[in-house]
Amino acid sequence: MSITWSQEAANHIRTRSRRYPEALDIEPDWTVEAVQDPEALWFEPDPKSSSGLGIRIIGYSVLAGFVVTVIAYRDGGQLRGATAYKANGSDLRAYRKGVS
């Protein structure tokens, strides 16, 4: 499974540090690796999604060198990215434990 990003969404994750102190900018290629990580955790639907349509994927990116949380949605047969960030807190703990 792969993920695609609109230009607007890709720019959003590439500029996270402008909006959030101490945040890291995320490259879309890192999210592709996280989604394709064989150990990735998939939460569908995302339990934190207000709409119930979101998908939370927590996976490791070799290029980034860390675990990435990807928030996505399905558009027909495609997985489309909404946002992404360096995993922390409960997402990182879940990934390390392999709990989904």
Image (cartoon, rainbow, N blue to C red):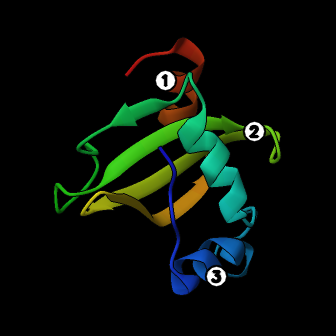
Q: Mark 1: give few (<14), some (14-19) or many (20+) Cα within 10 Å.
A: some
> How far is the residue under mark 2 from the one under mark 1?
14 Å
Q: In the picture shown, does residue 18 fall above or below 25?
A: below
**Amino acid type of the residue tagged 2 in the rendering:** Phe
Q: Is residue 99 left or right of residue 46?
A: right
Q: Earlier in the sequence, mark 3 or mark 2?
A: 3
Disc 3 marks which residue? 11
Residue 88 seen in render = no
> How far is the residue under mark 3 from the one under mark 2?
20 Å
**Amino acid type of the residue tagged 3 in the rendering:** Asn
Residue 67 place in picture, x, y as percent: 67, 38
Instruction: Count up the numbered dots.
Output: 3
Residue 33 place in picture, x, y as percent: 66, 43
Disc 1 marks which residue? 94
Residue 88 place in picture, x, y as percent: 60, 40
Q: Is residue 39 left or right of residue 79?
A: right
Closer to us: 20 or 8: 8
Which residue lies at the image location 39% right of the left edge and 45% below the top edge? 56
**Amino acid type of the residue tagged 1 in the rendering:** Ala
Residue furthest out toward the top: 97
Disc 2 marks which residue? 66
Residue furthest out toward the bottom: 8
Closer to us: 76 or 99: 76
Q: Earlier in the sequence, mark 1 or mark 3?
A: 3
